[in-house]
Image: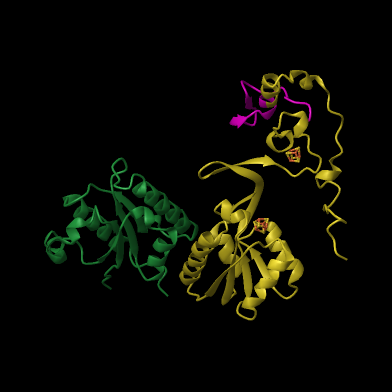
Amino acid sequence: MSFEPKITLFSCHYTSQQSCAEKGKELQQLGFPASITLVRVPCTGKVQVTTLLQAFEDGADGVYVVGCPVDGCHNVKGSVRAAKRVAAVKKALEELDVESGRIEMFHLPRGLHPEFVAAGMAMDKKIRALGPSPFQS
Amino acid sequence: MIVAERKPMAEIIEMVKDCSKVLVLACRGCVTVCSAGGEREAAALASLIRLGMKKQGKAIEIIEGSLVRQCDKEYINAIDEWNGQYDAIVSTACGVGVNFIANLRQETMVYPALNTTFFGGSAEQGIWTEQCAGCGDCVLHLTGGLCPVARCAKSLMNGPCGGSVCGKCEINKDTECIWQSIHDRLGSLGRGSQMEVIAPIRDWSTAGHGGPRKIVRNDLTIS
Ligand code: SF4
Ligand code: SF4
């Protein structure tokens, strides 16, 4: 049976700027996977553990966060905080006996960079390999 | 404050596995300050319980509530707001809170979401350390304000023991030898001679070895 993953991406304004270019068409043209729903946040430091868990409750098979480079966050520590929360959710998933790789953190340069698309492709590939979320009732 | 941390999810899921409705009850006291059982942590726990149950193919309805404290009768009464809406309470308070609910609500099943760990303080953001063991007969005036009961692995009253090496405890090289620190601090306060005073054999009955403890303040009781 073919599996079309649902992946939720939380990304800050700075690292996801290209999603606005040409009404998002540019990302599509660059091969950004259609399985990914992008949620833009002012700063990934604002993404709470509950926000990440809610994405799984809402049916995501995978979740990832893209924030600024560790030493170059627009809000100084925002992306570091996000990474800590992603790590906390990874641990909680393990406690529930669920693959911790269903959630990831990426620190990427700001603006239009191929890494943003590459991270999406990597996540899409990984979640396809992991299969559907075990939280689907 | 009382410092605690969340129990492993597998343990919590096992507690609630036969429930269809649960009240996850946060405490806005100590456990909010130590980020273990405040409203934010209770919301994350509610989400994790729903996910854990979903994984087992079960649905569970969760109500989230919180009390100012769970260690006062008056505040426990506020639980009545959710009467009839749950099969069990999962409390994110310390063990005191869980006990208080059990004491005061005969018909209510209550489960602990946390492992209550120690009386301590926040050494830096995200790090808490044990400072006092509530022994009921404080000796801090003799030890430069540093607690040998809670902070010495052997709770020695006449330390340090022979295992103290370069200011570290023999149980772990990352653990401060509190008796070395007591020695150094008394010295720097000009009270070094205190180290030569032999503490008498201690009566530990005040520390809980004499059974559960109770304080009655007749100046405050109203009956
Ligand atoms: S119930 Fe426990 S955690 Fe809550 S305020 Fe009282 S002592 Fe602190
Ligand atoms: S001596 Fe007893 S009361 Fe005093 S700080 Fe240590 S454990 Fe607490």
Q: Position of A10 compared to B37: left or right?
A: left
Q: Residue furthest bottom?
A: B84
**Which segment did they paint magenta?**
B157-181
Tell whether position B177 is magenta: yes
Q: Assign the C terminus of chain A to one quadrant of the image.
A: bottom left
Vertical order, B140 against B47 (above or below) = above
Tell whether position B20 is magenta: no
Give how far across and how far down residue A134 sits, in percent: 41, 67
The green-coloured chain is labelled A
Q: Residue at x 57, y 51 (%)?
A: B34
Give how far across and how far down residue A91 sits, in percent: 46, 53
Vertical order, B148 against B187 (above or below) = below
Q: Residue at x 22, y 49 (%)?
A: A110
Q: Residue A40 is drawn in which quadrant?
A: bottom left
In the image shown, does B196 or B55 lie closer to the viewer? Answer: B196
Quarter of the rendered structure image containing ligand 2: top right
Q: How many marks?
A: 0
Give how far across and how far down residue A96 sits, in percent: 48, 61
Q: Residue A124 is drawn in which quadrant?
A: bottom left
Q: Position of A103 compared to B127: left or right?
A: left
Q: Residue furthest front?
A: B219
The yellow-coloured chain is labelled B
